[in-house]
Image: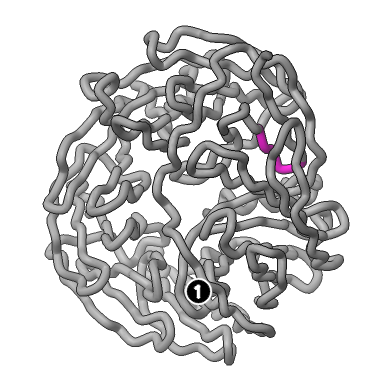
Amino acid sequence: MKRGFMRARARARKGHLWRTVTASAAGLVVTLSGCTTQKPAAATLSCSGTAAVGVTGQAGRPAQAAPGLRARPRSVTELPGGPSLVLAAADGGAPTVYRVDPEGDVLAGRLEGDGVIRRWRTPLGEAFRPRSGLVTLTAPAGGDGPLIVAAHHLHDEARSEFRLLSGAGQQLLSCTWRPYDSDERVELSADGSVLVATRTRKKPRISGSSTVADRHVEIYSTTTGERVARFRSTDYAQGGARVYGRLGSDVFAHEAGSGREVWRTDTGTRLGDPRKAVSAPVFVAGDRVVVQAPADHAVTVLDTATGTRLWGEALPGQVQSVHHLGDDRMLIHYRGGLAFTARDGIERLQPVPAAADGARQKLQHLIRTGDGTMAAVIDEGDRSAPALVVAGDTPELADAPLRIPITAAHAQAVLADTVAYVLPWTPDGEQATLYAYDLTAEGRLLWRSPVPHRLHIEESPGPDAGLHPYADGLFGLDRSTGWVLRPAP
């Protein structure tokens, strides 16, 4: 987290922007902080307005597959810039596009034809100008749900400014969190009533030869700004109106509004060393809490409502991300493969072996087709070229995943129903080439097309694509601009 935020701070100095997409829903502010002998300055929260938002839908489920652009596109249209967020329509229709312009105005539109048709514009002011701070956009409830805009100011009067907007662009809530530490991750919940600041600044005390960095979750009311709870935890996650944490072998849930602990479950296995500064995360997927013991990779799945242990099994590798597939099903991406789970345990494992040189793996895109789930996993090694691995539980992929070599240092990939789009990433130049591969013909190259800009690759464990297939083409989104590919007539 610290390393990623330092990169973001460096990019902000150069005028570049960092985008993150999160999803949560509760009622206050959550802070994960380091407890050290040098006590950091107390953070303060001030909010005005109301967060009466009817949040519908459930974030985190894979999108429905859009039709693939199988023929080489006839045109590439470049779009104006600004930090942006695209929400692809579940039915493959025209995506919703949000953007912050250079003046700090939020624009909402819909992708139609070769451009974006504006729906509304809401001015937020100088604090939200992209070159004044690190501006981020979040729309956890979907295209018609609330929109969260944040501006993180790293210098002078360090602070984070938040605005909660309705789906129609109305300002509902305004919050300021100060002082803002560049090593924190600060988030606002989908209904605007929860703020999350993950503190990773560490000035630990030294006990013998051991570095001790106790960590705590603090919950603050956005109505009064008062702290309502503080508890020790090596990590946390939000889901619904609760905050979930872990410590030693315990997993526990706190009621967000009051901070009251509602349940605590001893998993019977050590989930991490509380003296360490970094811990394996807590995952929430639907009505499941998922934790993993680092020693033997044993996964424990609990019910979010009661903390009841539902099942537990060991995986071959460390969990990277967890995704809700609907009902009682989940997809767990672990280092080295995918695990498809049902209510009572793992249904099947599909190995996705990493390169022998210790390659990094990331599940970049996840979609539902008519006959199953497909996942795009990028396998990047320090000394080997990356590869795109398309895996899933569809009939074509159930026996063995499809592997497509990539001749570049990095790449980004998304899936359509029968097509995989791959955009190799190079550190020099803005021009790039997009490749389309046929998933029905063992990854045969369909076409290649030049595009104006390479896209930023987010450093996050789960899907966070800058490519968006939809019924009429393909939309590519960078921090500062975008482009549209249209099919040939």
Q: Residue at x 38, y 73 (%)?
A: 243
Q: Is residue 298 left or right of residue 178?
A: left
Q: Is residue 124 above or below residue 174?
A: above
Q: Residue at x 71, y 65 (%)?
A: 169
Residue 277 appears in the rendering? yes
x then y, percent, for residue 204: 48, 69
Q: Is residue 358 above or below residue 325?
A: above
x then y, percent, for residue 116: 75, 41
Mark 1 residue element: strand
Q: Which residues are magenta?
A: 476-480
Q: Which amino acid does the dot numbered 1 rest on?
A: Thr
Q: Is residue 317 left or right of residue 148?
A: left
x then y, percent, for residue 184: 58, 64
Is 479 inside the magenta-drawn segment? yes
Question: Front-most of 369 and 105?
Answer: 369
Which colour scheme appears in the figure? one colour
Q: Circle 1 is placed at which residue position?
A: 31
Q: Residue at x 19, y 57 (%)?
A: 300
Q: Residue at x 36, y 22 (%)?
A: 355
Is 42 inside the magenta-drawn segment? no
Count of numbered circles on the image: 1
x then y, percent, for residue 149: 68, 63
